[in-house]
Amino acid sequence: MDRQKRVCAVHDISCVGRCSLTVVLPIISAAGADCGILPTAVLSTHTGGFENFTYRDLTDDIRPISAHWQNLGLEFDALYSGFLGSFAQIDIVGELFDDFKRPDNIILVDPVMADNGQLYKIYSPEMAAGMAKLCGKADIIIPNITEACFMVNETYEQGPYSEAYVLNLLKKLADLGPKQVVLTGVNFDEENLGAAVYEAGADGFSYVHAKQIDGYFHGTGDVFGSALLAGLLNGKTLAESAQIACDFVHKSIEFTLNLNQEPRYGVAFELALPFLMEKLGLLT
């Protein structure tokens, strides 16, 4: 390694409940990168499984932070966005991408806004349309099935899925503009759960997966996305990175279950970090 790679992570801070920046920052740091953060909002907890959480919108802070970084001459090997705190942030983050895009860096968008057929509490159909526009500026997008359906106006279905249903979603997502699409939450049977990996213009896709574990575990999308980016930053292909991310999520859930932790507090990814580093070839 001739220099340490630098990442800009554009996510919210949920102070309790492992997701967003409290997941992204340690995973990308463990993968050997310098991870800068641009918080989009601060919440006392994440919005799933908790009531009466506090919420502070940081929309007004994003442009001044970006301007300061530009004055410093900062460059990023990857920009990775997730949960956005307001409709206005969609265009503002798009500007951030324009300002820091280079021919050789990665813009990765996780359009965090929905799951299980439903939009999250602060999101609207208008925000879903805006998120689709933001995905057009990305090199890679990593929506789940629900988010994909909202962005391309398809009917949400529960799995197991047919290959035709998944391929249709992948092609329509690629039509938004990204070169590569990783569609998460894909299963073709009751035994496995994973992601479909697609290159724009292709006639088919590859599928990565791990054994399905029953239950709903908060924050696993952020764990997956962070591990996928970690793989890319360490020279892995997109499909290899997606498989590593699947395995890392699976290992994190196993630790969580073994410790009998409450799922709403997120998965015990910290205990699985040595597994991830080994998969990335960082442990000798």
Image (cartoon, rainbow, N blue to C red):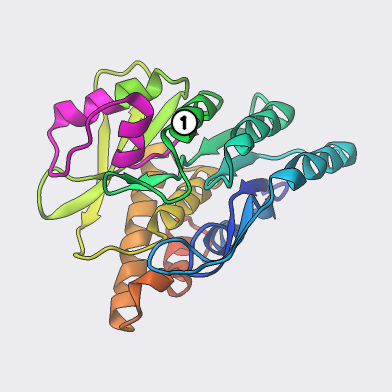
Q: Is residue 257 above or below residue 106?
A: below
Could you tell me which residue is drawn at 52 percent across and 48 percent down? Answer: 83
What is the x, y in percent for residue 132?
46, 28
Q: In this view, does 40 lie above or below 164?
A: below
- Image-quadrant location for residue 152: top left
Could you tell me which residue is drawn at 69 percent across and 50 percent down? Answer: 58
The amino acid type of the residue labelled 1 equals Glu
What is the x, y in percent for residue 219?
42, 60
Identify residue for label 1: 126
Q: Visible in this render: residue 67?
A: yes
* Range drawn in magenta: 140-169
Q: Is residue 104 above or below residue 191?
A: above
- The outermost residue toward the right is 71
What is the x, y in percent for residue 170?
31, 27
The total number of labels drawn is 1
Q: Is residue 168 magenta?
A: yes
- Image-quadrant location for residue 87: top right
Could you tell me which residue is drawn at 42 percent across and 58 percent down? Answer: 279
Q: Visible in this render: residue 199?
A: no
Q: Is residue 176 magenta?
A: no
- Say whether residue 214 is left or right of residue 243: left
Could you tell me which residue is drawn at 40 percent across and 53 percent down? Answer: 221
Residue at disc 1, secondary structure:
helix
Q: Nearer the viewer, residue 71 or 94?
A: 94
What is the x, y in percent for residue 9?
62, 49
- The outermost residue toward the bottom is 259
Q: Which of 195 and 16 is in front in this view?
A: 16
- Say whether residue 104 is left or right of residue 249: right
- Say whether residue 125 is left or right of residue 254: right
Q: How crowded is mark 1: few (under 14 residues within 10 Å), some or many (20 or more)?
A: few
